[in-house]
Amino acid sequence: MHYAWFILIACLGFYSVLIGICGNTAGIFLAPVMNDLGWSRTAASQYLGIWPLVAAVSQPFAGKILQKYDPRYILTAAVTLFCVAYMLTSQATQVWQWNLFGVIYGITATFFMYLAVPVLINAWFNKNVGFNIGLASAMLSLVAAFAAPIAQSIITAYGWQTARLYLGMAAFVFCVPVTYLFVRKNPEMLGLKKYGEDEVVEESAAANALIVDHAVSLKRAAANPAFYLIILIACVFTLCATFFQQIPTYAAKGPLGAAAGAMAVSIIMVGGIIGKFILGYVSDRFGATVAGTFACLCGAVGIFISFKSGSAISLFYIGMAIFGMGYAALSVINPMLTKQSFGIKYYSEIYSWIIMAIFLMSSVGPTLWAQIYDRTGGFTLAFIIVTGLYIVGALAIQFIMPSAKKTWDLNESPQDHITSA
């Protein structure tokens, strides 16, 4: 078996399992912590607003560090620090202690949350890059789907402190060894070639056009509109994804009912899991522009159908399933757009700035939708904005590759930079 598959297993460890167990179960701890410590919801959830901001500020530095040093040791240290800090929150009884965890969470997340997976998969795979990124992201959702009810049962039986400790221990025992044992920076360290590098690929012209690494530096990328258009697309996907959290409230406040809202969450998650595989495959086969356009249109159509469904629950569910495809775009389209526009030689430095926008919008999004609801008394304006954002994204994405091509040095020998999507 090619060592690239061990790299994928490592990605599942430090990304899918770690965030699925510890990150995506954060919401179920809020009520128990509030009740036990007598805190307000604002105090209990304050760290959830701190860590994305810390991550946004730290992200450009993380990109340079990961570019320069061995990710095996960097990621092992980041995962270890996160797990230890997470377990220590089981004993945290002061707001400042949770906020300190938020700072540690933000710093460590800059390495393992969005950056490391596409960097390592691009370095080790000569084909199916998008599909494998989609796989890692889909597995995160699956792990979270199983972790949440397990964590809730532990909280019910033994309390939130025990649940927090057990989840942190489980993540530490699996994620740290897998990261340390399997992560390697590139195939050359082991005297290997990328997976699939020697294969003769008979693909479409669109797919073949994606095999050249144009090695665009951060300076050249930042001087081109494509760089800022990718940031715009990242903001669109992130803001629209955060609206997902408002769906249960929207359903509960209207004729659909709370049960329909809860079911919609599951439908979006399932649609998102399937969507990540589809978008990854389409990105590999036809390019991220095609995949991104498809995702934006699905997001817009899905949200529009759901909004216009009224009390028709079946139509509401159909809309949510289609919206799941747009929801899936966040973790697949952004890294593939960046890679196909600027190559992988300076990928971690360039993509760090895209991730910074993602973290900022992750912090802004929930507040934005809450403010719209508080000021207007409903979600009508929010649905209109989400639909409009997806349409803007579908239009803006068409200009990225034509603009990015102007940064490519066509005098370089393609043989020097063969990578592949």
Image (cartoon, rainbow, N blue to C red):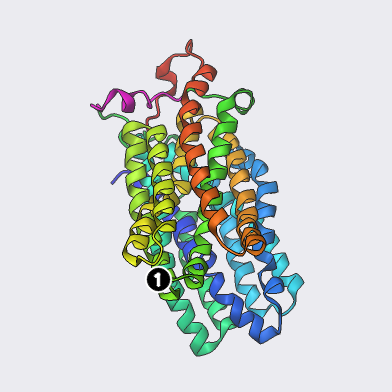
Q: Nearer the viewer, residue 47 or 16?
A: 47
Res. 185 in view: no
Horizontal arrangement in the rendering, residue 22 relative to residue 209 (left or right): right
Name the main secondary structure of what is drawn in magenta: loop
Amino acid type, residue under disc 1 in the picture: Ala
67 relative to 321, above or below:
above
Residue 182 in the image: x percent, y percent? 43, 51
Quarter of the rendering containing residue 232: top right
What range is drawn magenta here?
A: 200-213
Quarter of the rendering containing residue 382: bottom right
Horizontal arrangement in the rendering, residue 340 relative to residue 368 (left or right): left
Q: Is residue 202 magenta?
A: yes
**Residue drawn at x 58%, y 37% as measured from the top left:** 231
The C terminus - image quarter: top left
Q: Is residue 60 magenta?
A: no
Residue 408 in the image: x percent, y percent? 51, 18
**Residue drawn at x 45%, y 83% as measured from the top left:** 153
Q: Nearer the viewer, residue 153 or 201?
A: 153
Looking at this view, name the residue that lies furthest to the bottom: 157
Q: Nearer the viewer, residue 298 or 355?
A: 298
25 relative to 60, above or below:
below
Quarter of the rendering containing residue 46: bottom right
Dot 1 corresponds to which residue?
A: 260
